[in-house]
Image: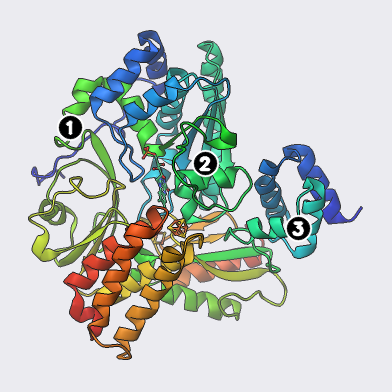
C-alpha cells in the first residue's frame, strides 16, 4: 500500500498495540501528576479540535485551579462538514479516548468527565455506555475518583465551540460566550472546565504510552505527532487516515486523488481551498488549521456549487448572536447567487470578499471569523466559475 | 394528569428541575413523540419555573428539537458538500417519490417525515441519512426503496 514514501504515515492511535489503555492510565498514575503534564508539554501536542492550543499548557492551567468541582469535557460535537475522525475514534478506540479523559481528570484533580456527543451520533451511545462500565471497574480497582457521563447534543454546529457547548449543557441556547473568562477559569456552571477534542484525549493517552520523545519525533517543527485526516470527495481512498503532519498537498493528492484533482479543501469548510497550482507550496499543518478534514474535488466539480453549499451551511448554522456573522453569511450567499445570475457585476465579488474580511475582524466566534478562509480562496482562485 | 404532564413529571423526576435539566427534558419528549409543541413547552416551563418563551427560545435553537408535528419516523438526509457531490439529489427524489411527499412534509398516515440536515459525519460513506437515530449510508434509489419497505413492514 505505502507505495508513496513521501507521505509519512503514522501508526499510533490506530495501531493495535498490546497495552490496554487503562494500563496506560495506571502507568501515568505511577509517574506523578506534574511529570505527566510536563511530558505532555514536551511532546508539543496541540489541540485537535481546530484551534490548536497546546494541550499540556491547558492541563497545567487546569491543575492550578483550586476548586472542589472541576469538569473534564470531551468535545464530540464534530459538526464540520467533511469531518468524521472523532466518530471513528469513538467507534474503534473509545478506550483510548476515555483513558485520556481519565488521565486528564487525575492529573488536574477533576472528578467529573462528560462526553458531549452530537445528536447525530446518538446511535453510538449504547456501545459507549458499555465502555464506560468497563472503565468504572478499572477506576475502582485503581481507587480513582473519576466519573464519565454522556451528554447528548441537539443538532447545532456552533455548539462545538467550547463556550457554546457549555451554554447548551446549562440548558440555554448554544450561543458562544465572551472570552475571557476562559472555561478553565469559569466554565460549566461557573466551575473550572477543561474542554478537549476527542482526538486530543486519545493523543494524550498515546503520549503517556510512548513518552514525549517518541511522540515529538513525528511531524514538523510546528506540529508534532500524528494527525487523523478525514478524507472524502473525489478519492478512491475515502476514510480516516493517520498521517504525520507536515506533508505537501501534492504528495497527498498523488496518494489519495483520483488523478484529476482540481482543488483540495483543508481544515474543513472553515479552512482553505487550495487550487492545483499551489499544491506544491502548501504544507498541511503549517499555518493552516489542524481540524483535519480534507475534501478532494476533481475537475468535474463546479466550485460555485461548492462555495454555495458552504455558505448555505454557514448561514444556517450561524447562531445569530452577532450581526456581522448573522447578516454577513446571508449576504454572501445572496451575493454569489446574484453574480451568478448576472444581476450584479463581476466586481461585486470583490465587495463580497471585503465583507468576509470584515466578518473575520468583527465576528464573535470562530464560525463568523473563518468564513473568509474558504470564501476568499475559492473566489480568488476560481473566479470564472463564480461568474459564468 | 394528561399524558404530556405525566411525561414531563417523569422527566423532571429523572433529571431534576434545575435549568440545566431543560435539554434532557426536551430530548426526552422528542424521544417519546418526536417533537415538542407549544403546549408541551408550557408544561415544561411550569415544571421548571421558567417562562415558556425561554423554553421556546432554547427549543427553537436546536435542529433536532422540532416544533411541528412529526411522523413516527423522521428521515433526515444530509445536504452537505460530500453527500451532495455523491448524488444526494437523486436520493431525495427517490424518497419523495417513494413517500409521495415533498421535503419538509409528513405522510398522511403520520408515519414518515422528510427533512434535510447538515453533515452527519458519514461523508466517506455518503450519500447518508438518518431515520430517527439510525444511520444509513452509501444510498442508492434502490437501497432507499428496500429500507422503506422494511420500515413500512415494521421489520425495523
Ligand atoms: C464554530 C466552531 C465549531 C467548533 N466545533 C468543534 C468540534 O466539533 N469539536 C471540537 O473538538 N472543537 C470544536 N471547536 C473548537 C472548540 O471551541 C475548542 O477549541 C476545542 O474543543 C478545544 O479542544 P482542543 O484544544 O483539544 O482542540 C469549534 C470551534 C468553533 C468556533
Ligand atoms: S460569529 Fe456567528 S456563530 Fe459566532 S457568535 Fe457570532 S453569530 Fe454566533
Ligand atoms: S457531507 Fe454528508 S455526511 Fe458529511
- Residue B135: percent from left, percent from top: 51, 56
Task: Tell me: residue A179, above or below residue A309.
Answer: above
Task: Tell me: residue A46, above or below residue A38.
Answer: below
**Nearest-to-viewer mark from 1 and 3:** 3
Asked if both marks, 1 and 2, belong to the same chain, the answer given is yes
Residue pointed to by mark 2: A116
- Residue A226: percent from left, percent from top: 24, 36
Quarter holding ligand 3:
bottom left
Identify the chain of the residue marked 2, using the numbered disc in the image: A
Q: Residue furthest right?
A: B1
The residue that appears at 39% across and 8% down in the rendered structure is A30
Task: Tell me: residue A86, above or below residue B112.
Answer: above
Residue pointed to by mark 1: A218
Residue pointed to by mark 3: B52
Q: In the image, is A301 to the left or to the right of A312?
A: left
Separation of residues labelled 3 and 2 (CA atoms): 26 Å
- Element at label 1: loop
- Residue A75: percent from left, percent from top: 46, 41
| Ligand 2 within 8 Å, label 3 CB | no
Residue A146 seen in the current view = yes
The residue that appears at 18% across and 63% down in the rendered structure is A258
Other-residue count near label 3 (Cα within 10 Å), few / some / many at <14 / 14–19 / ≥20: some
Other-residue count near label 1 (Cα within 10 Å), few / some / many at <14 / 14–19 / ≥20: many
Separation of residues labelled 1 and 3 (CA atoms): 54 Å
- Out of A312 and B89, give the one closest to the viewer: A312
- Out of B7 and A126, give the one closest to the viewer: B7
Which label's residue is closer to the chain start, 1 or 2? 2
**Nearest-to-viewer mark from 3 and 2:** 3
- Element at label 2: strand
Amino acid at each position: 500500500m505505502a507505495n508513496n514514501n513521501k507521505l509519512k504515515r503514522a501508526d499510533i492511535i490506530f495501531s493495535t498495540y498490546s497495552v490496554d489503555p487503562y494500563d496506560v492510565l495506571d502507568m501515568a498514575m505511577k509517574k506523578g501528576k506534574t511529570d505527566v503534564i510536563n511530558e505532555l508539554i514536551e511532546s508539543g501536542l496541540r489541540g485537535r479540535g481546530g484551534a490548536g492550543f497546546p494541550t499540556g499548557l491547558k492541563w497545567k492551567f487546569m491543575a492550578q485551579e483550586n476548586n472542589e468541582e472541576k469538569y473534564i469535557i470531551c468535545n464530540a460535537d464534530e459538526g464540520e462538514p467533511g469531518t468524521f475522525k472523532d466518530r471513528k475514534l469513538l467507534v474503534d478506540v473509545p478506550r483510548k479516548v476515555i483513558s485520556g479523559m481519565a488521565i486528564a481528570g487525575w492529573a488536574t484533580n477533576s472528578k467529573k468527565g462528560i462526553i458531549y456527543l452530537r445528536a447525530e451520533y446518538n446511535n453510538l451511545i449504547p456501545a459507549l455506555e458499555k465502555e464506560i462500565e468497563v472503565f468504572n471497574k478499572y477506576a475502582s480497582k485503581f481507587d480513582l475518583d473519576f466519573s464519565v457521563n454522556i451528554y447528548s447534543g441537539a443538532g447545532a454546529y456552533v455548539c462545538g465551540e467550547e463556550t457554546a457547548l457549555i451554554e447548551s449543557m446549562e440548558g440555554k441556547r448554544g450561543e458562544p460566550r465572551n472570552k475571557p473568562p476562559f472555561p478553565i477559569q469559569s466554565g460549566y456552571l461557573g466551575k473550572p472546565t477543561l474542554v478537549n477534542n476527542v482526538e486530543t484525549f486519545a493523543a494524550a493517552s498515546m503520549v503517556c504510552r510512548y513518552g514525549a520523545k517518541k511522540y515529538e519525533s513525528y511531524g514538523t517543527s510546528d506540529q508534532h505527532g500524528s494527525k487523523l485526516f478525514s478524507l472524502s470527495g473525489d478519492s478512491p481512498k475515502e476514510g480516516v487516515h493517520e498521517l504525520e503532519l507536515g506533508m505537501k498537498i501534492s504528495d497527498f493528492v498523488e496518494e489519495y486523488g483520483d488523478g484529476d484533482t482540481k482543488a483540495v479543501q483543508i481544515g474543513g469548510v472553515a479552512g482553505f481551498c487550495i487550487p492545483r497550482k499551489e499544491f506544491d507550496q502548501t504544507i498541511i499543518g503549517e499555518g493552516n488549521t489542524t481540524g483535519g478534514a480534507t475534501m478532494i474535488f476533481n475537475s468535474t466539480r463546479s466550485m460555485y456549487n461548492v462555495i454555495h453549499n458552504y455558505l448555505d451551511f454557514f448561514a444556517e448554522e450561524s447562531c445569530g448572536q452577532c450581526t456581522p456573522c448573522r447578516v454577513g453569511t446571508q449576504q454572501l450567499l445572496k451575493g454569489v447567487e446574484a453574480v451568478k445570475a448576472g444581476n450584479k457585476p463581476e466586481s461585486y465579488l470583490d465587495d463580497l470578499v471585503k465583507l468576509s474580511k470584515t466578518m473575520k475582524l468583527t465576528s464573535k466566534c470562530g464560525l463568523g471569523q473563518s468564513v473568509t478562509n474558504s470564501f476568499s480562496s475559492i473566489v480568488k482562485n476560481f473566479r470564472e466559475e463564480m461568474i459564468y | 394528569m394528561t399524558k404530556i404532564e405525566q411525561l414531563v413529571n417523569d422527566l423532571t423526576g429523572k433529571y431534576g428541575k434545575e435549568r440545566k435539566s431543560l435539554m434532557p427534558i426536551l430530548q426526552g419528549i422528542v424521544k417519546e413523540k418526536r417533537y415538542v409543541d407549544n403546549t408541551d413547552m408550557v408544561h415544561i416551563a411550569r415544571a421548571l419555573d421558567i417562562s415558556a418563551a425561554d423554553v421556546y427560545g432554547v427549543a427553537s435553537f436546536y435542529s433536532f428539537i422540532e416544533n411541528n408535528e412529526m411522523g413516527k419516523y423522521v428521515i433526515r438526509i444530509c445536504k452537505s458538500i460530500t453527500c451532495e457531490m455523491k448524488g444526494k439529489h437523486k436520493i431525495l427524489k427517490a424518497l419523495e417519490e417513494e413517500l409521495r411527499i415533498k421535503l419538509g412534509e409528513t405522510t398522511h398516515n403520520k408515519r414518515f417525515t422528510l427533512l434535510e440536515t447538515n453533515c452527519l459525519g458519514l461523508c466517506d460513506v455518503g450519500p447518508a441519512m438518518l431515520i430517527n437515530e439510525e444511520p444509513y449510508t452509501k444510498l442508492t434509489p434502490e437501497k432507499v426503496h428496500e429500507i422503506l419497505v422494511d420500515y413500512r413492514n415494521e421489520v425495523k
